[in-house]
Image (spheres, rainbow, N blue to C red):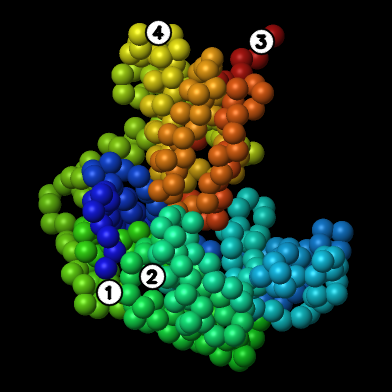
Amino acid sequence: MNETRGEAMKQMIVHCTQHITRMALLENGRLVEYAAERDQQQGLVGSYYKGRVINVLPGMQAAFVDIGQKKNAFLYVDDVLHPHLDRQPDVKPSIETLLQPGQDIVVQVRKEPSGGKGARVTTHYTLPGRWMVYMPFADYVGVSKKISRDAERSRLKGIGERLRMKEEGVIMRTVSQDEPHEAVEGDLSFLRAQWDNITRRAQTAEAPALLHRDLSIVQRFIRDAFNPQRDQLIIDSPAAVKEAKAFLDDMAPDGYKPVSLHNGTESIFTAYGVQEQLHKSFSRKITLEGGATMIWDETEALTVIDVNTAQYIGGASLEETVTNTNLLAAEEIGRLIRLRDTGGIIIVDFIDMEEDIHRKMVTERLEKVICKDRTKTHVLGWTRLGLLEMTRKKARHDSASFAPILCQCCGGTGKVGEWMD
């Protein structure tokens, strides 16, 4: 079994309405993740389609593929080449030599459509399981970087090498740490069967056709973040409770099933303090412990976070006060980036510090919080202007997010132009 000592106790709070399912993840009572999904608008990421190449664009080294959605999907040349870098040619070929218009092709969605853009798709197929990610043609074994013990990394890599067949690839997930050989093998067998089902459907389906849809929002969070031995799952829908228990039976047939139905008179989000935390965490202005503040602005290209001491006066000197403020802000920024599912380029304007060691302390505090995030995030460092740069991958869009409706007059800026004669 996984070693759980020192881990935060997690509660998954699921609020189901007629058309929307909302999920909040609490760690020791503090909100760290939130997601929502409309019943008729389940996300595309992770789903498999048999598509048809519509056109090939050599100048963009890309092709557009009809997968049955409103917008054709975008397939870049790198996503057509072999998934193992060592198996790719030294000189990247033209997309025209790999794909032709009218060709049928099986693709997996890696990024949701947004705005006027279609979905981003790939032929680097992956199927995530409880303990591993299965890649039918990757031809290598990887181990999560979050597993730090060398002996455990070697053990898991050895298990992967012994279990995989020719051409297959696997990545051992963080939760596979200390899991027995039999559990990992069972996960791989299940994923192989899933892949076989996809390939069989592809042989008979007429493009464009859906071959396999990823799990629902609740099932994904159970698979990726739930530990049946210590965490709790509270749902306010009897039907959803039944579905979650059935999914847990498949995932952990011998384990304890800590799933309960919320029967209180008040909303489940109100009863567990989720609603109040959502309002505070999704505000433009966020007040930190001691009175310091952050201003959070999102544009189409990037997110900008401005840190201010405001009423915080907690240090013996100006440098100490500034550093303490920035450390508080770094910890909260790490949590909120994960909670708000902020993606793309992120710029943080911390308060200016004189000492390099203090900037390093702030970076390390931020990285310590970010390491809990399952989404890949890179802290790039400080610019010459004293701004901290970072990037975070975001594959899914907010299909039913907790977000205010923008004012039709000011567009969310809080400013209305005044025209004078």
Residue 375, horizontal then vertical, whole percent: 49, 52
Q: Residues within 10 Å of mark 1 (few under 14, many from 20)?
A: some
Task: State the CA–CA distance, disc 4 to disc 1.
Answer: 54 Å
On screen, residue 421 above or below 148: above
Among the two numbered marks 3 and 4 on one chain, the one whose residue lies closer to the N terminus = 4
Q: Which mark is residue 118?
A: none
Q: Which residue is mark 3?
A: 420
Question: Viewer-nearest of labels 4 and 1?
Answer: 4
Q: Which residue is mark 2?
A: 130
| SS assignment at label 4 | loop
Q: Which residue is mark 1?
A: 252
Which quadrant, please, contains the N terminus? Answer: bottom left
Q: Residue furthest left?
A: 264
Question: Viewer-nearest of labels 3 and 4?
Answer: 4
Among the two numbered marks 1 and 3 on one chain, the one whose residue lies closer to the N terminus = 1
Residue 129, horizontal then vertical, whole percent: 42, 72
Residue type of the residue flagged with mark 2 = Arg
**64 left or right of 122 in image:** right
**326 left or right of 79 in image:** left
Among the two numbered marks 3 and 2 on one chain, the one whose residue lies closer to the N terminus = 2
Query: Are discs 1 and 3 less than 8 Å apart at CB?
Result: no
Task: State the CA–CA distance, disc 3 to disc 4.
Answer: 49 Å
Among the two numbered marks 4 and 1 on one chain, the one whose residue lies closer to the N terminus = 1
Residue type of the residue flagged with mark 3 = Met
Q: Residue at x 40, y 64 (%)?
A: 152
Q: Which residue is mark 4?
A: 317
Q: 388 and 303: which one is in front? A: 388
Q: Residue 280's image quarter?
A: top left
Q: Residue at x 64, y 21 (%)?
A: 385
Task: State the CA–CA distance, disc 3 to disc 2.
Answer: 63 Å
Q: Residue at x 30, y 78 (%)?
A: 250
Among the two numbered marks 4 and 2 on one chain, the one whose residue lies closer to the N terminus = 2
